[in-house]
Amino acid sequence: MTYAIIEAGGKQIWVQPGRFYDLNYICGEPGDIVHLNRVLFYSKEGSVKVGNPCLNNISIETKILKHLRGRKITVFKMKPKKNVRVKKGHRQKLTRLFVEKIID
């Protein structure tokens, strides 16, 4: 089993070739190829490589499938004794990436 742990969008994600993942918004059109270079950990058929903090010679080739928005969260702020109440909603912009291959 081949997999890698990468850092993208301020998060660490376990990725495998042939699967798709939702990350924070990445500029680009659907169908564009994106290379992710911040690989922290790489495993292929039992051999393991650990970066310090990153592996320089390994990158992840991904394809943008589509842009979407995350589920809605509600932000409610209230100041006691002042009759101030603010209710807002937020939906995060996301990008769905398909991991085509891990280049080592």
Image (cartoon, rainbow, N blue to C red):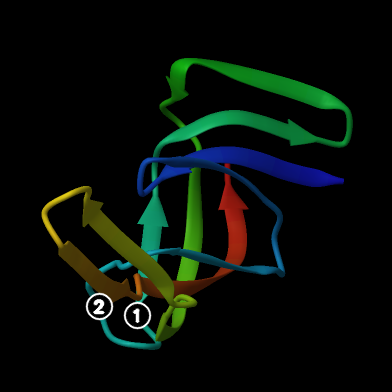
Q: Name above or below for residue 90 compared with residue 1.
A: below
Mark 2, secondary structure of its residue: loop
Which tag is nearer the camera, tag 2 or tag 1?
2
- Where is residue 23? Give x, y as percent: 45, 62
Dot 1: element: loop
Write down the quadrant of residue 72 in the picture: bottom left
Where the C terminus falls, by quadrant?
top right
Residue 15 as seen in the image, left or right of residue 33: right
Q: Nearer the viewer, residue 78 or 29?
A: 78
Residue sitting at x 52%, y 40%: 6
Taking 4 as reference, is 85 left or right?
A: left
CB atoms of marks 2 and 1 within 8 Å: yes
The percent coordinates of residue 63 (x first, y second) are 47, 74
Above or below — where is 81 with respect to 66? above
**Left or right, 5 with reference to 77:** right
- Disc 1 crowd rating (10 Å Cα; few below 14, some 14-19, many 20+) is few
> Which residue in the protein does label 1 denote?
32
Q: Which amino acid does label 1 sit on?
A: Asp
The x and y percentages for residue 98 are: 57, 72
Image position of 72 with respect to 82: above or below: below
Disc 2 residue crowd, few under 14, some 14–19, many 20+, Cα 10 Å: some
Q: How many marks?
A: 2
Q: Which residue is drawn at 31% across and 62% down?
A: 76
Q: Which residue is drawn at 71% across and 69% down?
A: 18
- Residue type for callout 2: Gly
Who's the residue at 75% across and 22% down the image? Answer: 48
Taking 34 as reference, is 17 left or right?
right
Query: Furthest-front residue in view?
Result: 81
**91 and 13: which one is in front?**
91
* Marks 2/1: CA–CA distance: 6 Å
Q: Which residue position holds label 2? A: 28
